[in-house]
Image (spheres, rainbow, N blue to C red):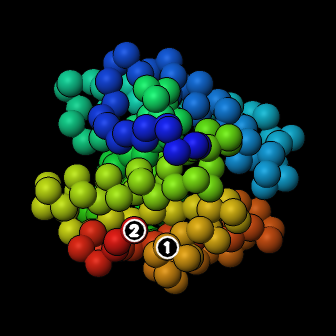
């Protein structure tokens, strides 16, 4: 990103669907490869399809429980973040302790825009939106080592850590955060 690029954070619209789906394909594939998991093609495709369904749910006027924000640079979608009811992995890892807490997720940034503040801008935008809605807590999780390092820096120690969640040697972390105490 250069100094002339204009970063905006806004709501997901139907017109953004194709761009968002392409972002998921690029960034999820990249995340798996950087974790040394690029050979798990079926898992990559399943994750991409899950995110596409989440976008469809967010755009469905009959379901109001899923919300997306997008980061755009010069009108090009470069990142996403979502807020929705707590997901299955968090339910399992916390033994349903956080079932009533919404989940921050689907934070993906195109590989060429990573480590340039796009993700932090998306988190700030989502936290501002949640505060306006009166949401005081959220949770998030990750099994990706690279993401876990970032979340440890941004959100501190996790609420729960589960060893061998995805298989031997894998660690899954869940954070419980307060919207009022997190600033970026």
Which residue is the site of mark 1?
154
Which image quadrant: the C terminus? bottom left
The single residue placed furthest to the bottom in the displayed view is 157
SS at badge 1: helix
Does residue 20 sit above or below 43 in this rendering? above
Does residue 47 sit above or below 98 in this rendering? above
- Name which quarter of the figure residue 62 lies in: top left
Residue at horizontal 33 percent and vertical 48 percent from the top: 84
The answer to whether the residues at label 2 and label 1 have Cβ atoms under 8 Å apart is yes
* Residue 171 seen in the figure: yes
Residue at horizontal 32 percent and vertical 24 percent from the top: 13
Does residue 119 sit above or below 134 in this rendering? above
Along the viewing direction, whichever of 2 and 122 lies nearer the viewer: 2
Q: Residues within 10 Å of mark 1 (few under 14, many from 20)?
A: few
Which residue is the site of mark 2?
184
Q: Label 2, label 1: how many angstroms apart (C-alpha)?
A: 8 Å
Q: Position of residue 121 (x, y in %)?
A: 42, 54
């Amino acid at each position: 990103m250069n100094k002339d690029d204009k970063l905006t954070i806004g709501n997901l619209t139907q017109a953004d669907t194709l761009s968002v789906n392409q972002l998921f394909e690029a960034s999820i594939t990249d995340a798996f490869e950087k974790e040394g998991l690029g050979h798990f093609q079926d898992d990559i495709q399943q994750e991409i399809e899950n995110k596409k369904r989440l976008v469809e749910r967010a755009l469905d006027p009959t379901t109001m429980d899923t919300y997306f924000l997008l980061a755009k640079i010069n009108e090009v979608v470069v990142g996403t973040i979502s807020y929705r009811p707590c997901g299955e992995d968090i339910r399992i890892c916390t033994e349903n302790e956080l079932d009533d807490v919404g989940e921050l997720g689907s934070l993906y940034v195109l590989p060429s825009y990573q480590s340039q503040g796009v993700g932090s801008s998306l988190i700030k935008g989502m936290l501002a939106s949640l505060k306006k809605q009166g949401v005081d807590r959220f949770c998030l999780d990750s099994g990706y080592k690279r993401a876990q390092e970032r979340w440890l820096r941004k959100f501190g120690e996790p609420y729960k850590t589960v060893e061998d969640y995805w298989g031997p040697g894998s660690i899954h972390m869940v954070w419980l955060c307060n919207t009022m105490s997190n600033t970026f």
